[in-house]
Each structure stands twice: as structure tokens, then as C-alpha cells.
Amino acid sequence: MTDHDTKTTQDTGQRRLNNETIPYYFIKSAIFLGFFSLVHFIYQMAPSGITLFIGAADESVFGHTKMAFYAWLFTLVLEYAVFTPRKLIDNKKSFILSRFLVATLLPWFEVIVWYFVPAFAKAELPLYFELPWAFAVVYFIGLLGGGIERKLQKAEFDLYLTIVVLVLFGLSVFFFTVFTWEKPWIDFFYLP
């Protein structure tokens, strides 16, 4: 392992895997997949307004994009809780904004990647193929999101870019909240 692959903490001198390495994002994507699986079934396991807020009552595209959004945010909270006490975040503002931007983009990555197979398979996928494909899609979009975060967490977010990220993030929260309880007539929000 090179110096780029590890980070030395000032207080202990220990070498640790950090959020600038590619292997780190393979682990993070697996954690995201775990959170996604949790929010996928949370409403069925414990139906309430709170679980519906982060989960879904159906298998719609909208429900899955919302699950990706909140699963990534849960992954961010865990990541921040682990790294912050160890002082492994160089620039907290860029760290958080890069993750908010990826949380906003990740649901749309899911749509783009998911529909790759149906573009070629014109019939409904059998469950023995659909389930592994679903897990692969969630894991893969986690890797895509991690690739963006890895570079953006080093970027300088000026006032304009900070506002853009926060507005898009706020609109995403609004979008996923409002349409959780009252879906519009647009077919994107219903079972395919």
C-alpha cells in the first residue's frame, strides 16, 4: 500500500484506509447496498408515516429512487460519524457537499443503469435474473457515486456551487417527500 492509500492520524500514527482510496468505495458501496435493502423493506416490516417517508409502499420507480436517495444519506451519516472523531476529513464543507450532490444524482443513476437491461430484454425479467440485477445495479451506482465523491471532496465549493448543491438537494427532499403521500398523474410514479 502506498502513502496515497493510507492516512496517518496525528494522534496515534496508525495507518488507515481512508476516503480517498478506491477500495474504500467498494466497502462504502456494500454499506449503501445494506442500507438500501433495509429501506426497501422497512415500510413492509413496520408500516408507519416515518417508515413510508424513507421507504416505499410499492415497487414503483419513484419508490426505488427515493430509497436510493435516503440509503445514500444514511451511508453519509455513518461515514461522517466514523471519520469525524478520528479527524480524517480534511475539508468538512467539501466532504458534505460532495455527498449531498451525489445523493441528489444517485437516484437518476439508478434509473439510467436499471433500464440498460430492459432496453435489450423486451420481456419482463424472470425473478432469478431480476433480483441479482437489482443488487448489481445498487452496488454499481454506489461505485459511480463514490467515484464522483472521491474527486469532489477535494474541490473548493464556492458560494455559487454551494447554493446550487443545496438547492438541488433541497428540491430532492421536497420531491421525495411531497410525492410520497400524493402521487401525480405522471406514470413515472406508478408500477411499470
Image (cartoon, rainbow, N blue to C red):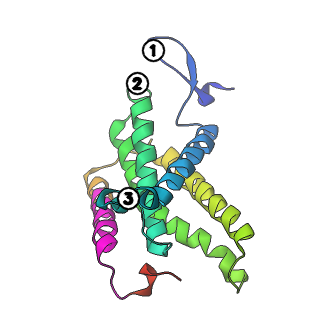
Residue 82 coordinates in the image, percent (x, y)? 44, 30
- In this view, the residue in front, 124 or 173, is 124
Q: Earlier in the sequence, mark 3 or mark 1?
A: 1
Q: Is residue 52 magenta?
A: no
What is the spatial separation of the Cα atoms under label 3 and label 2, in whole angstroms? 30 Å
User: Dot 1 corresponds to which residue?
Assistant: 10
Please indicate, yes or no, whether residue 21 appears anywhere in the rendered image: yes
Magenta range: 166-185
Query: What's under tag 1, amino acid-wise?
Result: Gln
User: Dot 2 corresponds to which residue?
Assistant: 87
Secondary element at image label 3? helix
Mark 3 touches mark 2? (CB < 8 Å): no
Q: Is residue 106 left or right of residue 180?
A: right
Mark 1 touches mark 2? (CB < 8 Å): yes
Q: Earlier in the sequence, mark 3 or mark 2?
A: 3
User: Dot 3 corresponds to which residue?
Assistant: 54
Secondary element at image label 2? loop
Query: What's under tag 2, amino acid-wise?
Result: Lys
Q: Residue at x 43, y 38 (%)?
A: 78
Q: Residue at x 55, y 43 (%)?
A: 28
Please indicate, yes or no, whether residue 89 appears anywhere in the rendered image: no
Quarter of the image with the N terminus is top right
What is the spatial separation of the Cα atoms under label 1 and label 2, in whole angstroms? 9 Å
Q: Earlier in the sequence, mark 1 or mark 2?
A: 1
Residue 144 coordinates in the image, percent (x, y)? 57, 56
Question: Is 33 above or below relative to 25?
Answer: below
Q: Which mark is residue 191?
A: none
